[in-house]
């Protein structure tokens, strides 16, 4: 009975087909990942791309790099070339000038006889009459003449760029003539093609009368023949020739300001990039050693760091200039770099130390030690790379700080000094003529401001993109 049942069961089992035992397939909807797997830096770059201010700042920095590196290749003007006929010219894209003779000699006009009469005081002197120009006024020279004043012992001439509104607002004295017979004067003091207001007063024994005569004169743009031949070899007296374009104007020595801004950008940005990279790397190494070893090593390094922080930067900048023997007219780039590197590594060192103190107890650090990794390997291979996000943000803030420091030191004459151009030294030159020629100061100040602002905004964007706490909230 039992045998028959077993045979029946076996016969049933063998009769079943393979399809009966095929696995059941259930179709399940497969959903793709909404966000691909990204590395830390790829995710940071995507987050940075969403920050419009940071991307705009990155574009500005790229344009500054192009202006600094490719600009001199496109604008082939010597930044040190002086053109004394184009002193402190405003921004322009080229004008024309009349060529005048450079051998013409001015012969003052003298009266053969003076009007008879005496006066008791300078206030009793009459106003000069007949004040006019002798020939066509030009930017080379303006010649004035007038009629004699009875009882005068001399004359004084004032000149101003803006029309005087009252008697006390006639500008600075241009010349004092002590010979009463001299009735003419030639003005050659930095003339431009714009209106000038001349004021003439008679004097009695050096005392001004207060009774004045004014004349408005607008010189035409002119160029001496010797200077015109440098522009055009076929220039002739009386001919009109085109002058070179100066989009940003010229400085007080007739040097092209655009070319000097490009040359100054190379110096300022070189200091602004090289110095932070060196002292950030130095601070990264010192702070990493201090944080990893701890104990007495950490205590000693931190006390040295506190000492360096307490040192006055400006005083040591002066000492470095003296130690390197930098004299008047010599570039101060090297002592400035040494001072920045020697005294500015402390912030990066303390920042790195704090990061390493947090990371040295991590599991991957203990695993590396168990595998026999040496301390230097653990520090360079594991700890320092994991602090690069914070260090990168610190670098983007250190660059504009260094650029501003260089500009400040050069502005006060302790950094880069003329004839070596930098944005700070250009501001120092421009502030002296700011009231009369503001473009000499405004353009380098604008480049400093835009550069510092761009790097600061980029630093803010990088800080937001690399902050893990902000990443976890999205």
Image (cartoon, grey):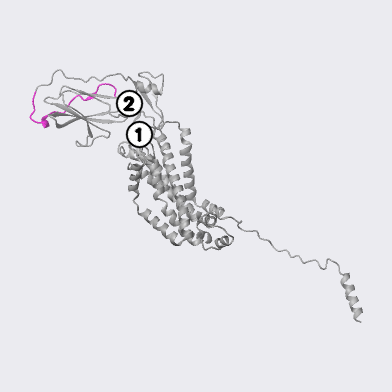
Query: Residue 50: x, y in percent?
Result: 52, 52
Counting from the top left corner in percent of width and height, residue 385 is at 53, 54
Q: Which residue is mark 2?
A: 220
Q: CA distance from mark 2 to mark 1?
A: 20 Å
Q: Label for residue 169?
A: none
Q: In this rendering, does residue 404 appear at all? A: no
The residue stretch that appears in magenta: 117-137
Q: Is residue 373 magenta?
A: no
Q: Main secondary structure of the magenta part?
A: loop
Total residue callouts: 2
Q: Nearer the N terminus, badge 2 or badge 1?
A: 2
Quarter of the image where one finds residue 229: top left
Q: Quadrant of residue 228?
A: top left
- Residue at 18 percent across and 31 percent down: it is 212
Visible residue check, residue 217 = yes
Farthest-out residue, bottom? 1
Residue bearing the label numbered 1: 251
In the rendered image, residue 130 lying in the magenta stretch gets the answer: yes
């Amino acid at each position: 009975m039992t045998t028959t049942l077993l045979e029946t069961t076996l016969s049933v089992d063998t009769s079943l087909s393979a399809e009966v035992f095929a696995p059941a397939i259930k179709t399940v909807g497969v959903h793709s990942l909404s966000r691909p797997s990204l590395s830390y830096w790829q995710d940071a770059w995507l987050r940075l791309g969403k920050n419009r201010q940071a991307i705009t700042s990155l574009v500005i920095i790229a344009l500054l790099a192009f202006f600094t590196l490719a600009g001199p290749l496109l604008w082939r003007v010597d930044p040190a070339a002086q053109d004394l006929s184009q002193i402190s010219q405003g921004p322009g894209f080229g004008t024309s000038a009349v060529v005048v003779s450079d051998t013409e000699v001015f012969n003052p006009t003298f009266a053969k006889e003076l009007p008879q009469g005496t006066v008791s005081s300078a206030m009793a002197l009459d106003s000069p009459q007949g004040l006019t120009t002798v020939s066509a006024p030009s930017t080379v020279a303006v010649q004035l003449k007038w009629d004699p004043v009875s009882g005068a012992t001399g004359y004084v001439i004032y000149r101003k760029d803006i029309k005087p509104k009252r008697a006390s607002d006639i500008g600075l004295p241009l010349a004092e003539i002590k010979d009463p017979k001299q009735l003419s004067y030639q003005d050659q003091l930095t003339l431009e093609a714009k209106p000038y207001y001349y004021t003439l007063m008679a004097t009695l024994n050096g005392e001004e009368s207060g009774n004045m005569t004014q004349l408005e004169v607008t010189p035409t743009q002119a160029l001496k023949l010797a200077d015109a031949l440098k522009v055009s070899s076929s220039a002739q007296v009386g001919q009109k020739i085109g002058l070179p374009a100066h989009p940003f104007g010229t400085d007080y020595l007739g040097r092209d300001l655009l070319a000097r801004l490009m040359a100054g950008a190379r110096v300022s940005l070189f200091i602004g990039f090289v110095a932070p990279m060196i002292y950030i790397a130095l601070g990264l190494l010192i702070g990493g050693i201090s944080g990893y070893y701890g104990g007495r090593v950490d205590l000693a390094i931190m006390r040295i760091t506190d000492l360096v922080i307490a040192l006055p930067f400006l005083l040591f900048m002066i000492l470095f200039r003296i130690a390197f023997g930098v004299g008047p007219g010599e570039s101060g780039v090297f002592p400035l770099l040494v001072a920045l590197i020697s005294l500015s590594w402390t912030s990066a060192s303390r920042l790195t130390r704090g990061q390493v103190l947090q990371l040295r107890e991590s599991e991957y650090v203990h695993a590396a030690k168990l595998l026999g990794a040496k301390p230097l390997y653990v520090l360079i291979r594991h700890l320092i790379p994991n602090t690069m996000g914070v260090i990168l943000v610190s670098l983007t803030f250190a660059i504009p700080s260094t650029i501003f420091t260089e500009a400040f030191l050069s502005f006060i004459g302790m950094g880069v000094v003329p004839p070596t151009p930098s944005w700070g030294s250009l501001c120092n030159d421009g502030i002296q003529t700011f009231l009369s020629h503001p473009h000499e100061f405004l353009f380098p100040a604008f480049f400093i401001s835009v550069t510092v602002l761009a790097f600061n905004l980029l630093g803010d964007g990088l800080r937001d993109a690399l902050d893990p706490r902000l990443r976890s909230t999205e």
